Image: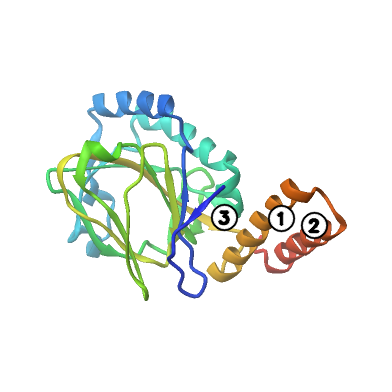
Amino acid sequence: MHDIFNCRNAFKMMLHIPAVLSKAQVAELRQQLDRSEHWMNGQLSAGSQAQKIKKNLQLDSSSVLYQQISPIILQALKSHHLITSAALPKHILPPLFNCYQDSGTYGNHVDNAIHYSPLLGQAIRTDVSLTLFLSEIDEYEGGELVVEDQYGCHEVKLDAGDVIVYPSTSLHRVEPVTQGKRIAAVTWIQSMIREDAKRSMLFDLDMTIIKLRQQIGDTEEVLQLTHHYHNLIRQWGDL
């Protein structure tokens, strides 16, 4: 049902979610992205510190293509049950589309704590970071997303259409792409549950309830667990 990387620091969680987009959806998006002339220097959207370590291209968010495909990605993320369960989103920012090639890289950094949402017209807190891979693994060399914690470095390189979700508090980087092209969509989520540890516990509880319902149905014990799950969201929720 889900694949949790062994990457926990005070219950911090990395979650691999396969096939959020189908191969057909990825192929259609890639055709449009590969033909686009609206790629700009990724440093233009970075702060002064990030500009020193960021070398990539970013699809111009004012372009017609961006306006067409961004809602498609956003809807796919909002409607996926594992993303909902793991992140418990309050707000999801419109995604950015990045391209790494010709030794493109993004050095060690922590994502900004606050991003402005053009859809909401307000700032949102970034609790959860998300990368949707749009290049197949064999299309490029290098380009691993590396997330660091007290247990070491964790490399992530997934099939096109797959998503990795991880806490925005994590130190991470994108290794240089030495051959080919790495295209991905990235975005950030403000969760209803601010703390990583509580969000992780709720996800584990939700997955356990789903598994028990499949095995034994809606028994009194399963309903009691469901009762506790929703009451914890009421207690911890930041609405």
Label 1 Cα crowd, 10 Å radius (few <14 / some 14-19 / many 20+)? many
Q: Quadrant of residue 39?
A: top left
Q: Residue at x 70, y 62 (%)?
A: 233
- Secondary structure of the residue carrying tag 2 is helix
Label 3 Cα crowd, 10 Å radius (few <14 / some 14-19 / many 20+)? many
Q: Nearer the viewer, residue 123 or 202?
A: 202
- Left or right relative to 221: residue 96: left
Cα–Cα gap, marks 3 and 2: 20 Å
Q: Residue furthest front?
A: 215
Mark nearest the camera among 3 and 2 is 2
Which disc is residue 86 wearing? 3
What amino acid type is highlighted by mark number 1?
A: Ile
Q: Nearer the viewer, residue 76 or 93?
A: 76
What amino acid type is highlighted by mark number 3?
A: Ala
- Secondary structure of the residue carrying tag 3 is helix
State yes or no: discs 1 and 2 in contact (Cβ < 8 Å). yes
Cα–Cα gap, marks 1 and 2: 6 Å
Mark 2 = which residue? 222
- Left or right relative to 208: residue 148: left
At which x and y percent is residue 151? 37, 73
- Secondary structure of the residue carrying tag 1 is helix
Q: Is residue 108 above or below residue 142?
A: below
Q: Quadrant of the C terminus?
A: bottom right
Q: Residue at x 68, y 51 (%)?
A: 211
Labels 3 and 1: the sequence-earlier one = 3
Mark 1 = which residue? 209
At which x and y percent is residue 96? 37, 43
Label 2 Cα crowd, 10 Å radius (few <14 / some 14-19 / many 20+)? some
